Image: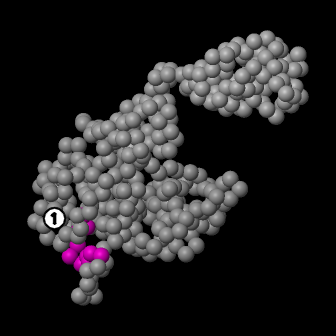
């Protein structure tokens, strides 16, 4: 009934999208979006030999003269007409085009000024402090690949290319519904002891926003099949991914799994041998996905990181944002089940190596969301692995 974790990940990886949504955005509005086009240089940078320092442009063969006449001044951005002749130099500033006839720049620190001449106090090699044509990038070079998430370096490079409005993938709309008659919204008054405050829908909204989605909060839905069906159907109309929490296990009031089938969605898988969150379900209808997460807060958080994030990335041809690293166990780890396990741990970097421990991390049910507080990561052990000893090297999933 339950599949191997690796198999579920492969099913997600194998999903093909038939139509991607794209749009053009003003450059500064594109921060955090995924590029839907390659960015190709349409010119050389620099286009002409350019000074890399403040100094004096001259012919290197004249260095043996020891003294050179200052023929002119060449401020950055100016169009200098004079050229460097035998025995002369032109004062040139950082970013200025090198004057015609000059092949080397000697920094101001290497000369002494004597009237209208410079005296060379420290020699430099041929071509010193001259930026070659295309040093930064060459015309026709692909500088940023399609599928790259735009950050400040990409903004800077595109600005240098005068890319006013790059083409980006639209961030997928992620609708979030929590099911459960016992759930209370923020600010709602508790009227009996059986009611609990909903946190799942808020942490899922935060996860979707942080990792490239556009969350749409749909609130809490009562454990009533028709209410759930209507809510999921409405969410499918206006979003690319619908995420539900609760209602996917095997209880009398777990209706989400039934509703998904009735809405004509194809269940890609239901039930994975993972801890926490074995009742995870992922379905698809066209280019839209439904992700049914367990109801316990820690379970829904971990399974969202594992299954929601790759779908958000897939819908915009991006990359899964969480990386895996090797870390050293600073205390023993007891494997609790023959499943792929994701265990909250404290992470720190010491002398170039990651180390983890479990101080103040509680052992209990999959409802302990406070285990995610602190400098936390997730220790990953697959179902074939057993308990591990202090000093063992283990795999850790980074969250930021």
Regarding residue 128, the answer to whether it shows in the image is no
The residue range painted magenta reads 177-186
Is 191 situated above or below 331?
below
Q: Residue furthest bottom?
A: 192
Q: Which residue is mark 1?
A: 228
Give percent across and percent down for residue 167: 34, 35
Residue 307 locus on image (x, y percent): 36, 53
Where, by quadrant of the figure, is residue 355 drawn? bottom right
For label 1, the SS is helix
Q: Nearer the viewer, residue 56 or 289?
A: 56
Classed neighbour count for the residue bearing mark 1: other residues with Cα under 10 Å, few (<14), some (14–19), many (≥20):
many
Asked if the magenta segment contains residue 180, the reply would be yes
Left or right: 184 as drawn, with respect to 159 = left
Query: Which residue lies at the image location 13% right of the left edge and 50% below the top edge?
Result: 264
Q: Residue at x 85, y 27 (%)?
A: 115
Residue placed at 79% from the left, 11% from the top? 86
Q: Is residue 183 left or right of residue 324?
A: left
Residue 92 lies, with reference to residue 191, above or below; the image says above
Res. 113 visible in picture: yes
The extreme top residue here reads 86
Q: How many marks?
A: 1
Residue 50 in which image quadrant: top right
Q: Position of residue 201 (x, y in %)?
A: 30, 66
């Amino acid at each position: 009934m339950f599949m191997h974790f690796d198999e579920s990940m492969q099913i997600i990886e194998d999903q093909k999208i038939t139509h991607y949504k794209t749009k053009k955005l003003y450059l500064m509005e594109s921060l955090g979006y995924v590029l839907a086009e390659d960015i190709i240089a349409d010119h050389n940078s620099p286009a002409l030999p350019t000074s890399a320092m403040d100094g004096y442009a001259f012919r290197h063969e004249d260095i043996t003269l020891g003294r050179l006449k200052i023929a002119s001044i060449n401020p950055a951005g100016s169009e200098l007409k004079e050229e460097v002749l035998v025995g002369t130099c032109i004062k040139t500033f950082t970013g200025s085009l090198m004057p015609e006839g000059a092949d080397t720049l000697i920094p101001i620190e290497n000369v002494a000024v004597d009237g209208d001449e410079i005296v060379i106090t420290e020699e430099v090699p041929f071509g010193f402090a001259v930026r070659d044509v295309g040093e930064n990038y060459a015309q026709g070079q692909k500088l940023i690949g399609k599928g790259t998430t735009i950050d400040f370096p990409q903004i800077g490079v595109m600005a240098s290319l005068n890319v006013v409005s790059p083409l980006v993938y639209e961030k997928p709309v992620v609708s979030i519904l929590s099911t459960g008659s016992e759930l209370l919204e923020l600010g709602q008054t508790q009227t009996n002891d059986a009611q609990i405050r909903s946190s799942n829908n808020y942490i899922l909204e935060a996860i979707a926003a942080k990792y490239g989605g556009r969350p749409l909060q749909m609130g809490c839905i009562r454990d009533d099949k028709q209410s759930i069906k209507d809510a999921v159907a409405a969410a499918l109309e206006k979003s690319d991914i619908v995420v539900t929490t609760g209602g996917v296990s095997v209880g009398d009031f777990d209706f989400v799994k039934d509703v998904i089938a009735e809405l004509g969605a194809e269940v890609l898988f239901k039930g994975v041998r993972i801890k926490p969150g074995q009742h995870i379900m992922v379905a698809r209808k066209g280019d839209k996905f439904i992700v049914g997460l367990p109801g316990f807060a820690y379970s829904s958080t971990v399974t969202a990181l594992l299954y929601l994030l790759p779908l958000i990335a897939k819908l915009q041809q991006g990359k899964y944002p969480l990386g895996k690293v090797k870390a050293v166990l600073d205390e023993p780890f007891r494997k609790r089940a023959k499943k792929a396990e994701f265990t909250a741990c404290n992470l720190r970097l010491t002398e170039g190596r990651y180390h983890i421990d479990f101080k103040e991390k509680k052992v209990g049910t999959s409802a302990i969301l406070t285990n995610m507080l602190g400098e936390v990561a997730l220790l990953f052990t697959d179902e074939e692995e057993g308990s591990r000893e202090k000093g063992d090297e283990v795999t850790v999933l980074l969250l930021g």
